[in-house]
Image (cartoon, rainbow, N blue to C red):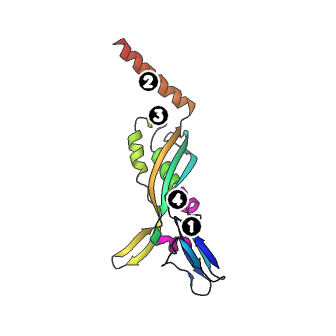
Amino acid sequence: MFIIIPPGNLGVMYRTLRGGTDTRNTYDEGLHIIPPWDTLTLYDVRLQQQTIDFRVLSDEGLSLGIQVVVRFRPHEGMLGHLQKDIGTGYFERLIKPEIESHVRRVFGRRPAHELYATVREVLQEFGQITVPGRIEKTDLGIVSLAYVQIQDVKLTIIELPKIVENAIVEKYQQEQLMLDGK
């Protein structure tokens, strides 16, 4: 069979008669000839972006609407293991649950009314996301090799309950009235 790997993609071979998934080699862009009983799975290795919308609970139990944008790419050296261990749906199975869990921890430690005051701290904590990897024994001991690289996580929307929004607006209005009165 003739397979064309388009630009920005790499292929991972599954060899039906010779040991299953080839975890050592990947196939570059271009034309490849493979036996009809083997399968070549394509992975986009360019920088990708996904938006995740979900709800989290603040420290006091208020429901907040959150939207984050995640930029990621698979580790090229781990594509064979990614194919064997997780598959092509790795965003839904690996990245999205980790992002949601991390965001829930960050927001769950803060009351909703403090989010705007501590936004810098919140954004710094967003950069500390780790994605599970493959555990392997090496000469250096046991190491974890990440399947994907998360380049960036951006918080794009925080939807506060109306009661909190009104309280924040009222607080700022009171501060402005006090400043004008001086």
- Decide if residue 108 is in sight here: no
Closer mark to the observer between disc 1 and disc 3: 1
Residue 145, by quadrant, is: bottom left
Q: CA distance from mark 4 to mark 2?
A: 38 Å
Contact check, label 1 and label 3, Cβ < 8 Å: no
- What kind of residue is marked 1? Pro
User: Which residue is depicted at the point 40% across and 54% down?
Assistant: 128
In the rendered view, tell whether residue 160 sits above or below residue 93.
above
Q: Which badge, 2 or 1, comes first in the chain's sequence? A: 1
User: Which residue is depicted at the point 43% across and 75% down?
Assistant: 136
Q: Which badge, 1 or 3, comes first in the chain's sequence? A: 1
140 lies left or right of 74: left
Residue 96 within the magenta-colored segment of the rendering = yes
Q: CA distance from mark 1 to mark 3?
A: 49 Å
Q: Where is mark 2, residue-wise?
A: 172
Q: Where is mark 1, residue-wise?
A: 6
- What kind of residue is marked 4? Ile
Give the residue furthest to the top. 181
Closer mark to the observer between disc 4 and disc 1: 1
Region of the chain picked out in magenta, as a range: 78-97
> Quadrant where the C terminus lies?
top left
- What kind of residue is marked 2? Tyr
Q: CA distance from mark 3 to mark 2?
A: 12 Å
Q: Which badge, 4 or 1, comes first in the chain's sequence? A: 1
Q: Which badge, 3 or 2, comes first in the chain's sequence? A: 3
88 lies left or right of 147: right
User: Which residue is depicted at the point 41% across and 19% down?
Assistant: 176
Closer mark to the observer between disc 2 and disc 1: 1
**How far from the left and from the top, in percent, is residue 35?**
63, 83
Q: Where is mark 3, residue-wise?
A: 113
